[in-house]
Image (tube, rainbow, N blue to C red):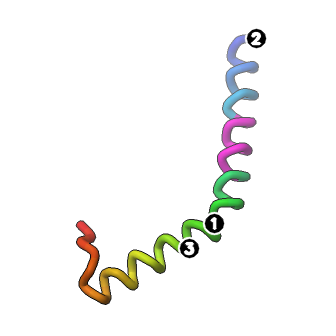
Amino acid sequence: MTDRWQVRNEGSDLRRMLEVARTGELRMDRTVSGLVRAAEAGEGDIA
């Protein structure tokens, strides 16, 4: 019983993470392009 409940919990966590990733895609794209612009301008230090 606990195993099944654990799997169900992990499944819902994954679904929640996917939803967050989907809604955060635009924000991430802006952040990445901002980092690229900073790197091209020589303002950012990307390790």
| Disc nearer the start of the sequence (2/1) | 2
Is 16 colored magenta in this rendering?
yes
Q: Residues within 10 Å of mark 2 (few under 14, many from 20)?
A: few
* Residue drawn 75% across the image and 28% down it: 8
Q: Residue at x 68, y 17 (%)?
A: 3
Amino acid at pointer 2: Met
Q: Kindly identify which residue carries mark 2.
A: 1
Tell me the amino acid under the disc marked 3. Asp
Horizontally, residue 41 falls left or right of residue 10, namely: left
- Report which residue position mark 1 lands on: 25
Query: Residue 41 or 25: which is nearer the viewer?
Result: 41
The foreground one among 8 and 42 is 42
| Disc 3 target residue | 29
Label 2 secondary element = loop
Q: Along the horizontal axis of the image, is 26 left or right of 8?
A: left
Tell me which residue sits at (68%, 36%) in the image: 13
Up the image or down, 21 lies above or below 2; here it is: below
* Gap between marks 1 and 3 measured at Cα: 6 Å
* Mark 1: amino acid: Glu
- Label 1 residue SS: helix
The magenta stretch is 11-18
Q: Residues within 10 Å of mark 3 (few under 14, many from 20)?
A: few
Q: Position of residue 47 (x, y in %)?
A: 23, 66
Instruction: Tell me the CA gap for discs 2 and 1.
Output: 36 Å
Which is closer to the viewer, label 2 or label 1?
A: 1
In the rendered image, residue 17 lying in the magenta stretch gets the answer yes
